[in-house]
DNA sequence: CTATTAGATGTTTTT
DNA sequence: CATCTAATAG
């Protein structure tokens, strides 16, 4: 199916449908960026200006100019972006494109660490902890040091981990973080530091690596200019290209400095107006200061928008013009026609839901594919009502982001068995397993772990442990299971799936005992078992789950009969970098966008504004922003509260939109929505060109 | 020490 | 609203 390798200038024959539809040739700015020979290059690319396309063409040009594909490193933000980028490079440059190295920062760091870690004191058989694991380990450190023994208020493990992670990713000193975000804990500074020291050495002893370590170790590996190893790693690549640069943090900037130090061939692409990941330590300073960090950088601005119609662009331009930004872009388009974006006032959530589904079905009838439409929202659970309605009306959909599959307790339980089998020193997983046993609580578990620490975590060490009488039977069964998992050198097809099967023989009964809603949980485990079957061994499976968790319900194999065409539901964050023919932004209410808790901090409010900007700029032809007026509020027992439209949709922004009002459903017909149209979509459709 | 239950609590975004 | 914490019974 892949085109044979062709020389670069043949692009007009190979370009993918949307590239061709947008524009046959690169525009001047894009061409400048693509042709840039060497040295640092900053591409400031507004929404929809062909950023990915430019990056892809630039890679193809480098290949055509003789750079070997494996000497190009293409860093993207999410695995979805990496996949799309690489397949487009492949389409453009043929099989060479497949050999280009690409992935997320964390994924690339993982690869390098497995390879070079042993030369730097990190065994190659480490286990990666996800955020939840890291928090659990933090809890063990906290308990070990005797903090939080029901004395005064002491920070929770989540808080501890957040402060630690923030410190590593931003390099802001711990006291400053506490003063800024947790003034109530400012006098615990010394405790924080002691816990972090213990946490760090605990990770080392247990052969564990957290997300932050992946970046930190990479930065340290390439940070010392004189170290031979740094030289070797930086020497792996001749060109480094980075997408979504506005969402990188200080650590990542340091990594890039190290990687590019010799050749300075670094290309970064980004849009300061779309910076939405500061909660992860990302700083817009990286893109703003790039010319200073990499002296002599060439700067190219992409300002022609190929995505949206002029009426949509008018509204989004106004929205973002309220923000202070440094790289002022003036986005324009040649797509002059089209309807104004809709501002939909719905009576309540149900009315909003009904409006969205009705309108989607209408567009679908007009010939828009479901997969060319998306509903975007601030937080994962905000689509719950919509999902129910879509299911009831048999509209296939796929949900991105906000997926908690791997965070579910029962899934983590099963994974803990595999992780202990893989890394017997994995303290977090041991602790989790032990607590599952009937008759074992915190004290017994700790005693067992002390035994393991003393006797070297060996496979037989656990079997030799003398459990208290009440837990003896469970202990014996677990020991046998672990023994069989470790000894089974079964490398045949589906071995991992059988391992999960063996674990479930032991675990399913515990699950039934401990949790409610047993059926869906068992179904999750069925899924996990199927996924496991696709991996060659435990190590690959566990690393992949930590670094590339399933991103959508479809990745998990649900809704298989509707794979071909399904509506996309996504958080605004997960929608970044994508575009759709029609976009619905729901819950545009003050308190959600911006989030109420962000209001105290001007910086955070600005980020919320950019988030709405990202969401709205995903639309090509149709955009509707909706908000419910009356919201049932369970916290205040005073039934309903009246919500206001997001402050970002101020008078000036609203002027470019057309108002639509959706009334509440009249109660007698509530039982059958299909016979009781609430709005006359046809009338709206007729009137929508009239401004 | 563990298991169970009642009560509080605090709700984002992702690698 | 479901998850985590604290308190108490077994």
Image (cartoon, coloured by chain):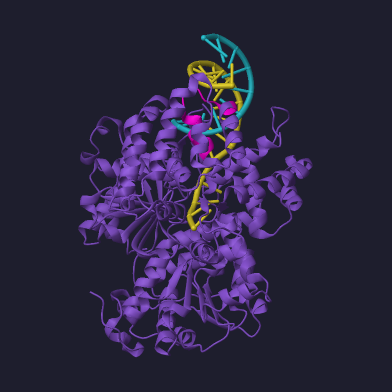
Chain colours: A purple, B yellow, C cyan
Image quarter in which the N terminus of chain A is found: bottom left
Q: Relative to A110, say whether A190 is above or below.
A: above
Q: Main secondary structure of the magenta part?
A: helix
Q: Is residue A651 left or right of residue A504?
A: right
Q: Relative to A573, say whether A418 is above or below.
A: above
Q: Position of residue B2 (x, y in %)?
A: 53, 21
Residue A329 visible, this angle: yes
Q: Position of residue A467 (x, y in %)?
A: 52, 25
Residue A325 visible, this angle: no
Q: Position of residue A461 (x, y in %)?
A: 52, 37
Residue, x 27% and y 85% (percent of image)?
A13
User: Which portion, as a residue range, is magenta?
Assistant: A430-443
Image quarter in which the C terminus of chain A is found: bottom left
Residue A440 is a magenta residue: yes
Figure quadrant of residue A79: bottom left
Residue, x 44% and y 82% (percent of image)?
A58
Residue, x 69% and y 47% (percent of image)?
A196
Count of marks, rendered view:
0
Residue A72 is a magenta residue: no
Figure quadrant of residue A506: top left
Q: Is residue A383 left or right of residue A221?
A: left
């Amino acid at each position: 199916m892949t085109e044979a390798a062709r020389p670069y200038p043949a692009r007009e024959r190979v370009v993918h449908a949307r590239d061709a539809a947008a524009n046959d040739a690169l525009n001047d700015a894009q061409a400048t960026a693509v042709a840039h020979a060497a040295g640092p290059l900053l591409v400031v690319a507004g929404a929809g200006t062909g950023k990915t396309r430019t990056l892809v063409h630039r890679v193809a040009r480098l290949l055509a100019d003789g750079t070997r594909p494996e000497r190009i490193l293409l860093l993207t933000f999410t695995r979805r972006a990496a996949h799309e980028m690489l397949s487009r490079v492949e389409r453009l440059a043929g099989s060479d494109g497949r050999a280009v190295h690409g992935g997320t920062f964390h994924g690339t760091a993982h690869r390098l660490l497995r390879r070079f870690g042993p030369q730097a004191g990190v065994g190659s058989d480490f286990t990666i902890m996800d955020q939840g694991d890291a928090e659990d380990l933090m809890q063990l450190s906290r308990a070990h040091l005797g903090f939080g023994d029901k004395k005064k208020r002491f920070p929770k493990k989540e808080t501890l981990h957040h402060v630690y992670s923030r410190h590593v990713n931003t390099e802001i000193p711990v006291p400053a973080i506490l003063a800024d975000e947790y003034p109530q804990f400012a006098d615990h500074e010394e405790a924080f530091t002691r816990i972090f020291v213990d946490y760090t050495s605990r990770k080392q002893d247990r052969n564990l690596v957290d997300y932050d370590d992946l970046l930190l170790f990479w930065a340290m590996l390439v940070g010392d200019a004189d170290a031979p190893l740094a030289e070797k790693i930086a020497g792996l690549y001749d060109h480094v290209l980075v997408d979504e640069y506005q969402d990188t943090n200080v650590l990542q900037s340091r990594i890039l400095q190290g990687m590019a130090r010799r050749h300075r061939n670094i290309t970064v692409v980004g849009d300061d107006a779309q910076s939405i990941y500061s909660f992860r330590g990302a700083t817009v300073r990286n893109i703003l200061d790039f010319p200073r960090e990499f002296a002599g950088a060439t700067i190219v601005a992409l300002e022609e928008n190929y995505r949206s119609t002029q009426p949509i662009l008018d509204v989004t331009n106004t929205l973002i013009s309220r923000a202070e930004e440094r790289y002022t872009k003036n986005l324009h388009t040649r797509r002059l026609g089209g309807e104004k974006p809709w501002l939909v006032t719905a009576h309540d959530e149900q009315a909003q839901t009904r409006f969205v589904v009705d309108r989607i079905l209408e567009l679908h009838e007009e010939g828009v594919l479901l997969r060319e439409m998306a509903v975007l929202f601030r937080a994962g659970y905000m689509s719950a009502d919509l999902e129910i309605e879509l299911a009831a009306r048999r509209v296939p959909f796929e949900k991105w982001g906000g997926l908690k599959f791997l965070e579910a307790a029962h899934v983590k339980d099963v994974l803990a068995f595999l992780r202990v089998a893989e890394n017997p020193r994995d303290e977090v997983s041991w602790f989790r397993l032990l607590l599952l046993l009937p008759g074992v609580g915190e004290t017994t578990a700790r005693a067992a772990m002390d035994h393991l620490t003393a006797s070297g975590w060996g496979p037989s060490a656990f079997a030799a442990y003398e459990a208290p009488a009440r837990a003896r039977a469970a202990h014996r069964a677990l020991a046998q299971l672990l023994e069989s998992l470790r000894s089974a050198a079964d490398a045949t097809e589906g071995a991992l799936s059988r391992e999960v099967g063996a674990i479930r023989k032991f675990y399913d009964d515990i699950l039934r005992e401990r949790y409610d809603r047993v059926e869906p949980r068992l179904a999750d485990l069925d899924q996990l078992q199927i996924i496991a079957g696709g991996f060659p061994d435990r190590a690959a499976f566990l690393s992949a789950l930590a670094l590339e968790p399933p991103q959508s319900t479809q990745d998990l194999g649900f809704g298989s009969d509707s794979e071909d065409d399904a509506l996309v539901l996504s958080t605004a964050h997960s929608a970044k970098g994508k575009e759709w023919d029609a976009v619905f932004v729901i819950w545009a209410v003050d308190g959600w966008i911006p989030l109420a808790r962000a209001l105290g901090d001007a910086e955070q409010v600005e980020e919320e504004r950019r988030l709405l900007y990202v969401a709205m700029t995903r639309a090509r032809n149709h955009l509707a922003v909706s908000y419910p007026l009356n919201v049932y509020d369970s916290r205040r027992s005073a039934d309903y509260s009246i919500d206001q439209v997001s402050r970002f949709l101020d008078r000036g922004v609203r002027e470019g939109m057309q108002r639509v009002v959706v009334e509440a459903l009249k109660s007698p017909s509530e039982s059958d929505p299909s016979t009781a149209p609430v709005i006359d979509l046809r009338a709206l459709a007729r009137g929508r060109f009239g401004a």
